[in-house]
Image (tube, rainbow, N blue to C red):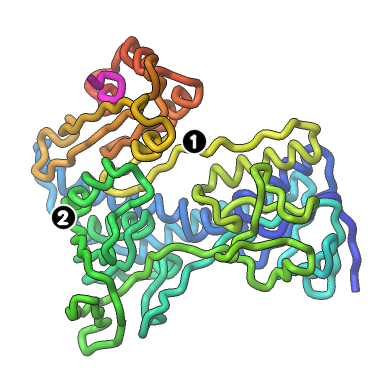
């Protein structure tokens, strides 16, 4: 049995784990990181990166369809789903290699295998035993199972990236951003898509203003939103049969379950280290990502926090390493200023408080501005893509505490506005800023 000692051991080489390991090593700590899968975690291998590449393919298809409005006579070309997968896989393999190089360049010891706690300071990986002064749990999350009869017949969002052929008729179960993004991609590439909401509002965690406009956007790209809930799946003569709570059934070539992810804590033997979990299996942490064991920490999806976003995990991991090994003061992440984007068609962007959240905290001190318009990018095309913007402000000086956008370019323009809002920009600051015309971004600073 091999025993090794480190200053810092990280379980999970996803975005948060790698960020923390590299930063700790840069401060001079002796660091090991343990991963049983591919480097980069969900984001690189089964999430953000392959999702965005698929979204870009879908947006290209939309551009080809819209070319006629600009005087191009462009027939709709066939799309090779297998070629897209091959190119996407090649790029992800490149990123996997870059992560490995980065860890090696920082002298981080990379260990492949499954880790579990032996005691509060010791981890086991096969026959190896690692002792550490500080331990970080960054094991991420896994697909939530679909617990209905025949639920095992459904594909997951992970399975989507393994497909070589695009299914022509698709059912998607879910109402969150994963369902919306995959539905949009498949519809834009030519599939018939039905999205079963189960009585929920799409993107319920966003401002209701976004939800009010989002259903229309989904319908425009070809995603049919159905309020019914799915109660059973079975194999039929025409593929997969979906039964709903309205006593209806429909046959599809593929059914995707997009009902979320659950913290990946099974098998870690957390109780042996004195690490508590909540009722959903997530590791309990405070605002500094410390668990119930003072020398053990957790960041990212494994904590079950509301903002399961890659940049949040990266920031948390780096701030933790800076505090533990770089002498930096505690620096909690302020959840009120975390920007978030859904890569739908068009994309959705949000930063700050929703109007209901703001009114619950501040009551009548909240004032809201909103607009809905057709951007110039849709002026000459048949498939008009509407946009909508809402500003949430607070107090007599109207400090901006929320910005919510649905429209072309929302994903890119939100970042700069997020900086301004975090720094305390007011409505007057926006009013007195010269606009860039004609853009969607100018609509944000010219609201009345």
Residue at 15% from the left image edge and 36% from the top image edge: 378
SS of the residue under disc 1: helix
Determine crowd level at label 1: few under 14, some 14-19, many 20+ residues with C-alpha closer than 10 A. few
Which numbered disc covers residue 336?
1
Q: Is residue 33 above or below residue 151?
A: above
Residue at 23% from the left image edge and 55% from the top image edge: 188
Residue 431 placement, left or right of 3:
left
Residue 260 placement, left or right of 373:
right
Which numbered disc covers residue 245?
none
The CA span between labels 1 and 2 is 44 Å
Rendered location of residue 421, percent (x, y)? 45, 25
Q: Is residue 350 visible?
A: no
Q: Is residue 288 above or below residue 136?
A: above
Q: Which residues are magenta?
A: 443-448
Residue at 48% from the left image edge and 60% from the top image edge: 46
Location of the N terminus by quadrant is: bottom right
Rendered location of residue 299, percent (x, y)? 64, 51
Q: Which residue is identified by label 2?
A: 76
Which sits in the foreground, 290 or 177?
A: 290
The single residue placed furthest to the front in the displayed view is: 363
Location of the C terminus by quadrant is: top left
Rendered location of residue 413, percent (x, y)? 37, 30
Mark count: 2
Q: Is residue 392 above or below residue 432?
A: below
């Amino acid at each position: 049995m091999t025993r090794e000692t480190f200053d810092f051991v990280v379980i999970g080489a996803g975005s948060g784990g790698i960020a923390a390991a590299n930063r700790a090593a840069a401060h001079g700590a002796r660091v090991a990181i343990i991963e049983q899968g591919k480097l980069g975690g969900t984001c690189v291998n089964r999430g953000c990166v392959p999702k965005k590449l698929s979204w870009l393919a879908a947006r290209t298809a939309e551009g080809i369809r819209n070319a006629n409005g600009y005087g191009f006579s462009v027939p709709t070309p066939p799309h090779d789903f297998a070629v897209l997968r091959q190119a996407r896989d090649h790029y992800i393999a490149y990123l996997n290699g870059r992560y490995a190089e980065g860890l090696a360049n920082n002298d981080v010891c990379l260990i492949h295998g499954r880790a579990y706690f032996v005691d509060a300071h010791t981890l086991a990986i096969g026959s190896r035993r690692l002792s550490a002064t500080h331990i970080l749990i960054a094991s991420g999350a896994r697909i939530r199972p679909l617990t209905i009869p025949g639920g095992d017949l459904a594909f997951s969002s992970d399975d989507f990236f393994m497909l070589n052929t695009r299914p022509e008729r698709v059912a998607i179960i879910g109402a969150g951003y994963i369902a919306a993004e995959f539905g949009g991609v498949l519809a834009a590439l030519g599939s018939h898509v039905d999205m079963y909401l189960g009585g929920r509002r799409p993107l319920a965690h966003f401002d209701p203003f976004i939800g009010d406009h989002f259903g229309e956007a989904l319908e425009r790209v070809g995603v049919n939103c159905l309020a019914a809930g799915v109660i059973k799946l079975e194999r039929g003569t025409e593929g997969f049969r979906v039964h709903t709570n309205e006593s209806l059934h429909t046959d599809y070539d593929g059914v995707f379950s997009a009902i979320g992810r659950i913290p990946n804590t099974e098998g870690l033997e957390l109780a042996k280290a004195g690490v508590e979990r909540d009722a959903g299996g997530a590791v309990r942490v405070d605002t500094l990502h410390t668990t119930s064991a003072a020398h053990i920490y957790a960041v990212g999806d494994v904590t079950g926090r509301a903002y399961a976003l890659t940049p949040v995990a990266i920031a948390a991991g780096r701030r933790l390493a800076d505090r533990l090994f770089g002498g930096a003061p505690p620096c909690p992440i302020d959840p009120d200023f975390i920007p978030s984007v859904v890569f739908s068609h068009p994309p959705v962007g949000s930063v700050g408080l929703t109007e209901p959240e703001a009114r619950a905290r501040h009551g009548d001190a909240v004032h809201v501005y909103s607009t809905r318009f057709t951007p110039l990018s849709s002026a000459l095309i048949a498939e008009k893509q509407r946009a909508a913007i809402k500003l949430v402000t607070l107090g007599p000086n109207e400090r901006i505490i929320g910005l919510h956008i649905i429209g072309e370019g929302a994903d890119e323009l939100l970042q700069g506005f997020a900086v301004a809002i975090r720094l305390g920009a007011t409505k007057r600051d926006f009013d007195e800023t010269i606009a860039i015309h004609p853009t969607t971004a100018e609509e944000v600073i010219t609201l009345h």
